[in-house]
Each structure stands twice: as structure tokens, then as C-alpha cells.
Amino acid sequence: MDPRIDTMSSLSREEAEAFVYQECQLLDERRLDEWLTLFTEDGIYWIPSSDTARPEDTSIMYDDPLQRKKRVHQLLREVHLAQTPPSRTVHLVSNLQFDPDPSPSEATVRCNVLMAEIRPADHATGQIGLNSPRLLAGHCHYHLRREHGRWAIAMKKVLLIDRDLPLYNITFII
Amino acid sequence: MLDQADPEMDLRALVEESEDFTVDTRVYTSPAIFDAEMRRIFLRTWVYVGHESEIPNPGDFRTSAVGRVPVIVTRDQTGAFHVLVNTCRHRGTVVCREERGNARFFQCPYHNWLYRNDGRLVQIPDSSGYPEGWAGRIGGLLEAPRIAVLYGMIFANFSQAGPSFDEYLGPLRRYVEYWFGHSPTGRVQVLAPFRASYPGNWKLQVENSTDGWHARYVHESALRTMHHFGTRSPAVGWPGATRAFPSGHGVLERPRDDLPPEVQPQFESFRSLLAETYGAEHAEAMFVRRQITLFPSFHLMEFKFRVIQPVAVDQTVIYEFPVRLEGVPDDVNAAILHRITREISISSGGPVSSFVNADDVEAFARVQSGLADSPVERIYFSRGLHREVIAPDGERTGESSDELPQRSIYREWRRLMHE
């Protein structure tokens, strides 16, 4: 471990903001291999389909590390029909709430996310499902843990406002 | 009404079967045909509306739809099921907006008409505004005149005419018995659904659920990903079979040889349990991966129900309900749930975000785009037409890549649309 990293102080607001901004940038630039490294070794990325859902219930996504690697592999290295053409995204996060945590190794960060997504294509012939911007909004809940001397995501849970409604093509990371 | 909308249209010619099996592309794009389907098909055949495990207690209800008719599926205080039209008899307001719940009465919010959970109108506020006995003449919420329950699945038929449920099911019954036989008690519990929508016609998903041919192409990225992570070998040949039945039903069968290592022990013990329960031969016949279509819009998939809900000619909702098998050890049910909700071949998210089903939905949107205003007038379901084998009871069999179940759908579709 790098001895210069202060492992004794808890997460600061500045660090929390920098962390979620960095994640937004990686997602919007489709740098998903780097995104994978933001998680702890057992980290979970979860988009539940109800506000009372448990991990074992049906979810929009519930990705453990292996599942997340498979998803990124399919997105980046295979011709994934639902991402042909791929989504362009802009993630905006705000209303960041930061729970001061006495623990030097755990932290909880909440924020709202508003995400615009579009799959651009030939627009002269009206390709259905493409060329129209879509908005997704939700509450993000991060549980961060200090691992190998840096902060990492133990759980990222995104509670979409339309979590229990039928959705179309969520084959990207929110 | 359909013929008024387009007097040129010959309904019988929309589906043609000779040396080729072709379908007029307007069946996916014409609002007039869609309107006719909702009345001529959905209101004249047996339509799945819910499962008894969703409404186990007196007073339980869930809302659902038959075509575009909103319904409340209730269990009344005596335990009997009712499929009630969710429309107030007074001014036509939707009475109940909750997806699930428990209620002895449903009250319309507009003028407070009150209905019991068996549909009967029991109270009109300040009833002196009507002659005595007037409410009795109204009766109550409209109700599906025929319902049938099979392995807890509740089907409604809004027509008194037409085949009984048993006639409608016909020789498909054996395969439905195989499917539910995975529970030694024949009982399943329906779990919370996956929900997805797509900008395409409802029949695109119905055709796809028993399409054994597309997987290698539409799902190539998922199959290659699984191969990359060592959880699946590349497919060779076309093992399995397709089956088609009178009344529009169909089956796609493939061997269950693609299980990931982490659930293989549980599935092996599951297979032994079935052999003990039914004998080895019957258990082997059962223990096949079967995707079954009950025409028009319901599928029994790999341990989940798939319900196709038409919304508009180019808008559809898919619900997928995983099931828990009664009388099966917890670790087997956990392995099944893992396969449905986590494992890559199906994965979490069902048709909305999974590695597999999201690509199907994308293909449907592409078809809808391709046919939007196209000079392509007919599409083909001819694959395997020359090698259909027809049994005396009407069951047809073909190879697993044949478009046999799709032809079955459109034969019944044509019968109901122009009869």
C-alpha cells in the first residue's frame, strides 16, 4: 500500500464528488474497462425493479463482478445488436448528500442522476427506437469502501423513477 | 369495420399457404388490422390473465388486460375467481388502478359507485335519484362469461361461442403437463416480473418465443461472451424439435445441455428427483428445455411465464414472471432462479437489459422500422414447410430451426380474423 495515502481519515465531500464525477466521465466516454476498476472485489451494481426489492428478486440489473465483466465484454468487444449503434450518454449528478461516517474505511454517498441517452443513426428513414433522446432519472446510492488504499464501490444502487414500469433497451450503464 | 377502413383489403389473403407460407406485412403496421385483432382474436379466444398464486387469499386481486380491455382478476370472499372489466358501469371510469392488492369492494372515484369483489354493484350514493331497484338492473361490472384454470393459470374468454378450454388446449396439454410436472405437486408460485416495452408489433415477440433459428445470429454476441468466459460451447447442428398444434399453439424443444457449471449439481439432483417421481423415461421426456406458446399471447419459457401485452400496432409490453416450483428442494429453486435472473444465457433484466433478450427486442424494432412504409408486401415463414409431419390428432413436428410454430400462430390468426 502506498504509505502516502491517508488511510485513517474518512471520506471527504470533495473526494466523494470527485469520485462520482469521475464515474460519470468514464461512462460517458465508454471507458468501461476503467469503470470496472472502480468497484471492490465483491462490488455490486444494482438497478432494482421496485423500491422494496431484495437482491434475489427480479431486477433490471444486478451485476456481481463476473456478471459486470461479461456485460462490459459484450458491450465493448462483441457486436451487441441492442447497442448497434451504441448509445451516446450524458450523466448529470447533483443533490449529492454525504453521510459523515466516523469509519475511516466505509462511506455512504447519495445523489440524483439525470441521464440523457441517444442512439444516432440514419435519420432520413425514421429508424424506430433511434434518433430520439431519452431521459432516465433516479436516486443513486453508493456504499464505498476503502480497499487496497483507495475508495471503491461496494454497492451502487440506482432507484429509477420508472423502476416498476416497462422500460425499453437499458443496455448501457446508468 | 376493418373492411370499411380499407375496402381493398382481402382478409383471407393476409396469410397465404401454398408452396410458400407468407404473411402480408400490413399485419404489423396497419392500425385497422390491430383494432380488428383486439376484438376478433383477443375477445374471442382464451387469454391468460393471471395466476392463482398472485391472489391466494379471499379479496386478493390483480389488474390485467384482455387485448386492450382492462380487467380486475379477483378472488371473492368464497374463494371463486372473477375476471371483471375494470370500467365503471356509470360513466366508464377505470375503477381500480393498483397492480395488486386486497379489497372486498371497489369504489369508483367519480361518483362513488361501489362494487363487491365479485363484481356486483352494491351501492349508489343517494340512490333516491333513481327508481327503486334500478341498481339491480345494472347488475355490476361486466364479467368474462367463461374462465378456466389450469395449474393455477387463469384464462378468460369474453365470448360464449367457440371452443371450450379443453378443446382449445387440445394435444398441447401433454407438453403443458411436462412443464408443470417439474414441480412434483404441479404447483408453482409466480414471482415479481421483469417488465419491458418495445416499439414494435405484439406478434413479433410471440413469433420469436418459439423461434429456434434466430438465436445463433441475434444472440451471437451473448453466445460468444459465454464462450469467452467458458460457460458454454459453440452450438453444433440443430438439436431438438418444433411442434405445432391446432388453435395456434406451438413448442420449441432443445436439450438442456447449456447449463453453466455453477448450477449443474443442482440440476442433476433435480433430474434424479424427477426420475424418482415419474420414472426415468417420463422424466427424460419432461426434462427438456421447452418454450411453449399458448395462442395468442402467453408463453411458458424456461421456468418463467412470458405475457405479451399489445398496446398499439407498434407498441408492446412484455412481462416475464419467474416461478418457484413447489415440492422441490430450496437449492434447486435457488439454482433455477440463478439461471433466470443472473446467469448470462438469460440474465437479469429480461428483455430490457439482459445480454440475450434485449437483442431480440432490438430485432423487433428493426423489423418495425423495415416495414414502416416498405414496398416489401409479404414476408416468409416457409422454413421447413416441405418437411412438416402431421399426426392424426393434428400435432405437427419439424426441426428446431423450422418456422413451424410461427405458421401455427398465423393459421389460427387467419381463422379468427376472417371467420
Image (spheres, rainbow, N blue to C red):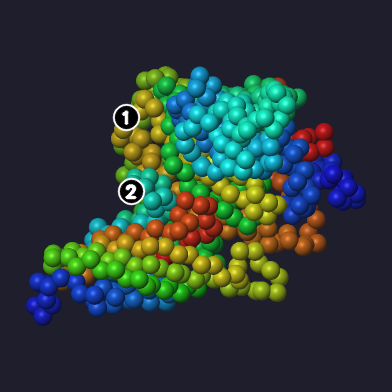
Residue drawn at (82%, 37%) of the image: B418
Task: Tell me which amino acid carries mark 1.
Answer: Pro
- Which chain is home to disc 2? A
Distance from the alpha carbon under mark 1 to that under mark 2? 20 Å
Whole-percent x, y for residue B335 in the image: 35, 39
Q: Pointer 1: residues within 10 angstroms few (<14), some, or many (20+)?
A: few
Task: Tell me which amino acid carries mark 2.
Answer: Pro
Badge 1 and badge 2 both on one subunit: no
B185 w.r.t. A118: above or below: above
* Picture quadrant where residue B141 is located: top right
Whole-percent x, y for residue B129 in the image: 69, 33
Extreme residue toward the right, this view: B7
Whole-percent x, y for residue B297 in the image: 63, 39
Relative to A7, B286 lies left or right: right
Q: Which mark is residue B329?
A: 1
As helix, strand or loop, the secondary structure at mark 1 comes to loop
Q: Which residue is at the front of the view, B52 or B8?
A: B52
**Camera-nearest label, 1 or 2:** 2
As helix, strand or loop, the secondary structure at mark 2 comes to loop
B242 w.r.t. B32: above or below: above
Q: Which mark is residue A55?
A: 2
Q: In which quadrant of the rendered image does the N terminus of chain B lie?
A: top right
Residue drawn at (74%, 47%) of the image: B34
Whole-percent x, y for residue A16 in the image: 26, 73
Q: Pointer 2: residues within 10 angstroms few (<14), some, or many (20+)?
A: few
- Which chain is home to disc 1? B
